[in-house]
Image (cartoon, helix red, strand yellow):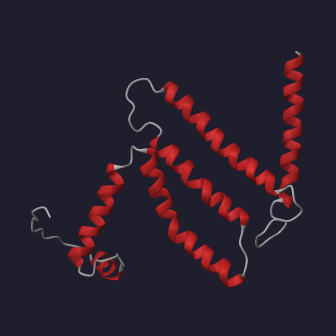
Amino acid sequence: MSKTVPLSVRLSAGDAEFLARVKIDDATTPSEKLRALLKDERRRREGRHEYDRVLALAREDSCPALQRIQEAENRFGVNSEVIHLVADRLPALSATLETALANEDGDQTEKLRELEGRLVDLIFGLAEAMLRLGVTKAVRGFDPDVVSDRIEPLLEIVDIVRVVKSQRKES
C-alpha cells in the first residue's frame, strides 16, 4: 500500500451526518468512507474519456434504480418489457454523449457529425425495438396497452415522412 498522508478536514454538520449514514462496502469509519469516496471519484474522473469505462459506470449508476424496479416487479409478479428495454439502451446513449469529444482538439465538425449518426443509430434502434413490441396486441408489463395505445400517432408520422420523401424523389 502506498504511503498515507494525515489530513484534517472540517465538515458541515449535514456532511458529517451524511458521512455517518452512508453505506459503503468495507468502510465503517469516517476515514475509510472518505478514502472510498475519493477512490470512487478518481475512478470516475480518470475513465471519463473511454467509452467502455463510461458505459460500465453508467450501468453501475443505474443498478440501484434497476434493483428497486426488479424488486417491485417481483412483488407484483410483473416484468415490464418496456422498462427493461429502455434501461438496457440508456447507458449507451449516456456514454456516447459523455465521451463524444473527450479526446479531441481543433476542428470537431467531423466528430460531431459522427456523434449525430451514432445517436440517431441508438435512438432508432430503440424506436425499432419499441415498434417490435407494438406488433403484438399487448406487451408484458404493468400496462399491456402501453405501446399499442401510443403507436398509432407514430405510424401516422411515418406515413407522412414516406409521402414527403416520395415527393422529393419525384421532383
Question: Residue 30, how many percent across, how many down?
Answer: 23, 78
Q: Residue furthest front?
A: 1
| Front residue (pair 30, 85) | 85
Q: Quadrant of residue 50?
A: top left
Q: Quadrant of residue 120?
A: top right
Residue at (59, 37) in percent of width and height? 118
**Residue 23 rendering spot, x and y as whole percentages:** 36, 79
Q: Quadrant of the N terminus?
A: bottom left
* Closest to the observer, 84 or 29: 84
Q: Residue at x 67, y 59 (%)?
A: 85
Q: Quadrant of the C terminus?
A: top right
Q: Is residue 165 left or right of residue 141?
A: right
Q: In the rendered picture of this protein, how many numbered marks are placed on residues?
A: 0
Taking the image as shown, residue 32 lies to the left or right of residue 125, namely left
Is the residue 41 above or below the residue 51 in the image? below
52 or 21, which lies in front? 52
Q: Does residue 127 lie above or below 26 as drawn?
A: above
* Spot occupied by residue 15 in the image (x, y as percentages of width and height): 30, 75
Judged left or right of residue 125, residue 46 is left
Vertical position of residue 66 compared to residue 112: above or below: below
In the image, residue 50 sits, relative to residue 136, either above or below, namely above
Q: Residue furthest top?
A: 171
On the picture, is 56 further left or further right than 40? right
Q: Residue at x 53, y 50 (%)?
A: 94
Q: Give percent across and percent down for residue 108.
A: 46, 27
What residue do we see at 27% from left, 63% from top? 38
